[in-house]
Image: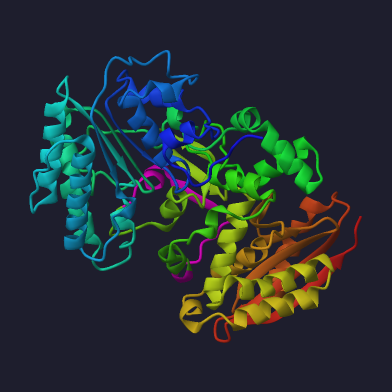
Amino acid sequence: MEKVATDIYTFSRLRAEGFTYVDKTDMLYAMASGEVGFQFFIARPRRFGKSLAVSTLESLFQGERELFKGLAVEPKWDWSKKWPVLHLDMGSSQTATVPELHRKWRHMLEDECVRNKIPFRDDENPATAFENVINDLAAASDNGLMVLLVDEYDKPLLGHLMKADVTEFRDALKAFYSVIKTLEKKQRFAFITGVSKFSKVSIFSDLNNLKDWTMHRKAGTLFGYTHEEVQANFPGRIHGLAEANGVSDDEAFRQIVKWYDGYKFHHAAEPVINPVSLGECFDKGEFADYWSKTAIPTFLVDILKEHPLDFSSVNIEEDDLETYEPEHPKLVTLLYQTGYLTIRDFVQMGSARRYSLRFPNMEIEHSFLKRVVGAYVRQDPGQSSGFAFAAGEALYAHDVPKFLKALKSFFSDIPYDMTDRQNEQMWQTICYVVLRSIGINVNGEVKTHDGRMDMVVDLPDDVYIVEFKLDRPAAEAMEQIKGKDYAEKYALSKKRLTLIGISFSSEKRTIVEELVEEIPAG
């Protein structure tokens, strides 16, 4: 049975204690060799192995060859050369004020000087202290060069998005990181990671030398595990998981893919499996939500309460997908960069691309939407899921009145300050979120030959076609369903078809009228 670590992010410890390491050193070598550049940046969601990659590079440049025995990089690397490494882990650099952040940076730099056995030349300006450390490390090196590794570069700023002081923190990061470009000639290699990719006119305006591999094909599977990697590295764990759940090894792997796979970091790359969630699944022997047990950023939920997003159809231009301004965070960009949405496909329009996004897997979709449902009614997700389960059970039982009653109960608990910006799309989105949060197979904006259906619920024995109208009669919704022959799309399904026209009142902020017609299974 392979040893799996879910809380070790240090390469040397992982290897020394015999934990399974999925070999990513061939891809790391593509950057570290210097063949294609010397300064790199990659953004990835949290808990995807960024810190382990940084630690692996640290051991590589420090020449710790014994740790790389049997790995792809060992025969390629020149082990006769070593470089001093400045490793800045910004994960602990969240502070309430910029002066506190400056002090934390200076202490971090001092600790790195102690580790590298060089004197620390402090300065009130942390950027100056940063310059001093880079210069002194390079001077202490046999070849006059040092290696710079910055992990979670954006952590000091993320806690201040949507707050009044975000610009102050952005300027602090910009001033500090500008040193990387200024002292480029002293660096054999630089690697920066984080969750967010801000536009180059903000934090990285001075770092036009950085090679951004965030959406580079060569880095598409650098973080996360491919199917082949999981099957090759964890056969014993897959078998143990299968035995624990009373299924075959093949079925256990299919469930792994269903729960934890689906992340794409380049449109042509293989999808990858979340490594931490997979490790937790192996450890506990059951399929469950692990990745989002850590807090979902509250500002994301706050934005969704202000502007409900139609998760059934999320599209974004390539430029917006890749970057955003700290002062003006874009919801879809944030959801992609933090790992709640991923690439489904894209459309090429001349030189521009438009991406279609989706939830990567069942773990993310269900856990995230439960939080959103809870935020809509300002309840704990466990409490708010009661509405969703009642609605879902009614649909499976083909009890349409009970389904509509559950929706009305849910809507009655939505605060006025959310529904005062209502439109048909908002109500449709909320219905979609409620049902998808418990795994109901619901699709929004379903295309037909003559239009788009607002919502379709597709169950083993039933198909429900739902059309929404705001301050217009339910009869108008039903006329649209029939006039555009929405049911034709499912005529050969041999399922019972139920047509539902729903009218919302902007004044009462709930369902005020509904029409239901049934077409027997054919």
Q: The C terminus appears in which quarter of the rendering? A: bottom right
| Image spot of residue 437 (x, y percent) | 64, 63
Residue 1 or 481: which is nearer the viewer? Answer: 1
* Left or right of residue 469: residue 463: right
| Residue plotted at (49% across, 43% down) | 355
Q: Is residue 148 above or below residue 499?
A: above
The region drawn magenta spans 305-324
Q: Is residue 162 magenta?
A: no
Number of marks in picture: 0
Residue 5 or 331: which is nearer the viewer? Answer: 5
| Image spot of residue 69 (x, y percent) | 47, 20
Residue 115's image quarter? top left
| Image spot of residue 108 (x, y percent) | 22, 48
| Residue plotted at (33% across, 61% down) | 159
Residue 417 or 42: which is nearer the viewer? Answer: 42
| Residue plotted at (56% across, 57% down) | 311
* Left or right of residue 425: residue 515: right
| Image spot of residue 453 (x, y percent) | 67, 59
Q: How is the image coloured?
A: rainbow
Residue 220 showing in the rendered view:
no
Residue 404 showing in the rendered view:
yes
Q: Is residue 17 above or below residue 316?
A: above
Q: Is residue 17 above or below residue 499?
A: above
| Residue plotted at (77% across, 63% down) | 464
Residue 208's image quarter? top left
Q: Is residue 342 above or below residue 12?
A: below
Q: Residue furthest bottom?
A: 508
Q: The N terminus appears in which quarter of the rendering? A: top right
Q: Is residue 322 magenta?
A: yes
